[in-house]
Image: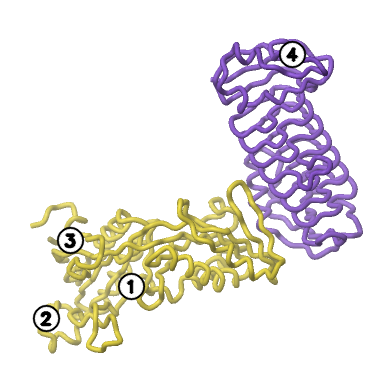
Chain colours: A purple, B yellow
Amino acid sequence: MTISLSLHTQPDVPLEAELISPDKLAGLTTAEIEKQTVEHGNQKTTIADFFTVAGEKSDSLVLEGDLSKIKHIGSGMSFGKININGDVGAHLGTAMSGGEIVVEGNVGDWLAPEMLAGRVEVKGNAGHMVGSAYRGSPAGILGGEIIIHGNARNEVGHAMRNGMIVIGGDSGDFTGVNMLAGTIIVLGELGIRTGAGLRRGSVVCMKNSKLLPTFSYSCVYQPTYLRLYLLYLQSLGLGIREEQIMGHYERWCGDIIEFNRGEILLYHE
Amino acid sequence: MKIKSTQIDDTFAEAFKMWASRIIITAETKQWAMAAATSMTGFATSVIGCKCEAGIEREIPVNETPDRRPGVSVLLFAMDALGLGKRLVERVGQSVMTCPTTACYSGLESEKTVVVGGQLRYFGDGFQISKKLAEQRLWRIPVMDGEFLVDERFGVQEAVGGGNLILLGKDMKTTLRAATAATKAMRTLTGVILPFPDGVVRSGSKVGSRYKSLMASTNDAYCPTLRGVRPNSELGEDVNCVLEIVIDGLNESVVRSAMQIGMQAAAKPGIKRISAGNYGGNLGQYKIDLYSLLDGDKP
């Protein structure tokens, strides 16, 4: 049994829909879900104004349609599952602490900022600030995992403190900027200034990259821990090659302007 | 009762409740994984003298190990969970971390765990790195060939130690051959180890000694050289060599299975009797009756 929300009317301006979450809808009937209030610009509207609702009383939500103007879906989510069959807007899964969100399309900016736990998987591309801290916040994600099969734009994992972010394609500039701990794995190309301000944590990339001069080269070696991560990602269907699992990596330490306990690992062909 | 020409004694093995952990060791090659496992299971024949009992459970093919490298699983037993944790830290630290290219993982899923990598991490002198993949926390400790990777916590569970068989043969050659056949058969099982040298012990012991400082001493009733001076000798005139096989397992069922197939394999011409060691049933929590391991009822 699932609760299904199919978009029938595209909003003119972004729809603030943080109540589309198992935490808010799991115990409601179909009629009650339809009456829930969502912010459409400066107007209060209901879910029924935009969605056709089917199903009730379930912790599994299925969303259909082009939701690229729907923001804050799954904010604060702590359990259950949301499947999104289409594109979706910004702030998806903000500060979620459990459960799972799977997006078949693309997502906007600020995917799962300040996430605590749980899992987000995006089959398409993501915007800026994946798993980041909000401006002024001391830390980004504290746990959980974010898997993006496509590309992501700038500042992936800004100030992240724990957890794992995986980008199946390319990552933009400032990947892992001000990172405190955790793991970012990029299977494609990195943008510029990766790991600027990195204190601890790992940024791993399968392509060579020009790094900041505040990172110092250590060695080429085979990090055993990375095999566990890559085998796990391979089991999720990401394009991990056998030679990457068993391969050698350049280890660069930094950022020397910070704590200098972080690392960037670059696959050594 | 008999198996072929071998008499099976109407007695039981007295086994004890212990605590156990399974340790998965991987390395760049099977040779190095086995080197670490061999070192880790050294001097671990009896809790009385070694504080723990340990043995190699099996080799693990690369497609079954966490990091797809050759692996070996080791079982370690101690009398309580606290002691087991201490032995794990000592032995993983001294025998596995020291061995080139190794990594070490918990191989037992259990609600109860003990901290191992979380203790060993301090060897990293501040350069150690924690990684958390799903619910698994690992420690990366920098060492001279790269990094030693170890699970923070290892699962531990209640287990059974001290299952045993005593083989009484006409001579040393025959008894050794039977013991070797029995241990080879027992090693086909998982969940059990045979902690003594190549699975066999010749210095079976009894509780107590005429010397106050000793809590155990030689099992004189089974020493063939003492048959002439010990009126309570358990040996007939046709027995000139006795060897014992001790079995520790993750549960009673697997210890029983090991004893069962061990008896079948050991019952060869020249093996006069197969017996088992016990303390009158007063010490151990488990009594494994030899007849119950055979198909028939007691005669």
Q: Secondary structure at mark 3?
A: strand
Q: Chain of mark 4?
A: A
Placement of the C terminus of chain A among the 4 image quadrants: bottom right
Q: Secondary structure at mark 2?
A: loop
Left/right placement of residue A212 relative to residue B78 reads: right
Tell me, for residue B232, which label it has, or none.
2
Left/right placement of residue B17 relative to residue A85 reads: left
Residue wearing tag 1: B200
In the rendered image, residue A4, in percent from the top left (x then y), is placed at 62, 17
Asked if badges 1 and 3 are on one and the same chain, I answer: yes
Residue wearing tag 3: B3
Q: Chain of mark 2?
A: B
**C-alpha gap between disc 4 and disc 1:** 80 Å
In the rendered image, residue B78, in percent from the top left (x then y), is placed at 40, 67
Q: Residues within 10 Å of mark 3 (few under 14, many from 20)?
A: some
Q: Residues within 10 Å of mark 4 (few under 14, many from 20)?
A: some
B225 w.r.t. B234: above or below: below
Left/right placement of residue B125 relative to residue B20 reads: right
Q: Residues within 10 Å of mark 2 (few under 14, many from 20)?
A: few
Tell me, for residue A45, which label it has, or none.
4
Q: Chain of mark 1?
A: B
Q: Are marks 1 and 3 in contact (CB under 8 Å)?
A: no
